[in-house]
Image (tube, grey):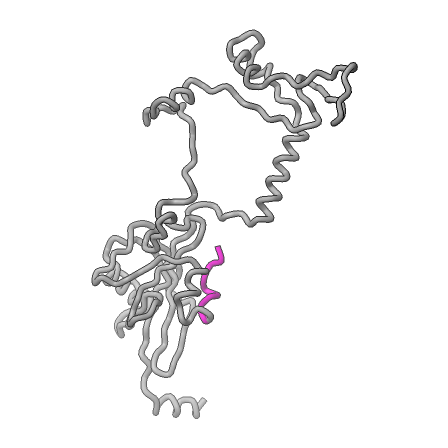
Amino acid sequence: MIGWSRTFATSAKPVIRTTALVSRNPVVTADLPQFESQFYRYQNELWKRLMWTFPKWFYYRVGTLSEQKFRELNPNPVYNNPNIEFPRGRPDIRQQRDRRFKQELSLPKTYSEAKEEDEVAANDNLSRKIVPNSRVTEADKKNDVTSLERKLARTLYLVVQQDGSWTFPTFDAAEDQALHTSAETGIYKLGGEKINYFNVSNTPCHVSSSDTSKTFYIKSHILSGKFEPQNGEKYMWLSKDELSQHLSNYDEIQHLLSDV
């Protein structure tokens, strides 16, 4: 311990820096791996094959106009005629359904759905058809790496170009400020006041040391707003896979990044 103190006393005092690890959490559910996607598709097809026959008499009363439209869209299967030979096996007809195959139904369109094909429904039309938004945004199509609307299923991290290289926003720590306060002040000076975020913890999640400096990493999440560089700095919002192509110290800090 005494020897270490003498060595530190004769060496130059390292520069203390803070690095803001600002991330945007995923907005939508994660993309399914190929195996899981194939498994769920198999389960769905199996369920359709083994499901009980659709009770059309419950939803479409016999003799009504809606029942007639349903029958036009879903003709009855081939009758199991004993005088005819069926090479693929005799039909197993139950409730006007051939139970050898899964049941695929086409339902008559409601008034609201039919109207939407001709003109856009009013915004206050509560009966309009619900169409989910695409998981692929315009930012994905244009490969706009400065947009927070890209890669909605992944965690994105803010990187800026400082001293000619890409890195997380790094600032010199003030002597009269805590580390997380220095990181917060630096983010607002660099990206403006329109970014709303919070620090996960006031305690640094990682420290990187060199002969001349010590850098403490403060993990944060952006909640709303946007990053607007005040001095024309270049910036990007990148996922973990993309960061490996831009950060020189990726191997050191990859354990801090989310795989999702």
Residue 188 x %, y %: 25, 60
Which residue appears at 42% of the width and 65% of the height? 245
Residue 145 x %, y %: 35, 55
Numbered marks: total? 0
Q: In this view, does 133 lie to the left or right of 83?
A: left
Which residue appears at 40% of the width and 25% of the height? 128
Asked whether residue 202 is drawn in magenta, I would say no
Residue most extreme to the top: 63
In terms of image quadrants, where is residue 57?
A: top right
Between 11 and 28, the one nearer to me in the picture: 28
Between 235 and 206, the one nearer to me in the picture: 235
Q: What's drawn in magenta, residue-wise?
A: 252-260
Position of 9 relative to 96 (above/below): below
Q: In which quarter of the image is the N terminus?
A: bottom left
Q: Is residue 143 left or right of residue 50?
A: left
Position of 125 relative to 142 (above/below): above
Which residue appears at 39% of the width and 62% of the height? 219
In terms of image quadrants, where is residue 249?
A: bottom left
Residue most extreme to the left: 231
Q: Is residue 147 left or right of residue 74?
A: left
Residue 162 x %, y %: 29, 69
Position of 50 relative to 118 (above/below): below
Residue 172 x %, y %: 28, 72
Between 205 and 44, the one nearer to me in the picture: 44
Position of 94 relative to 3 (above/below): above
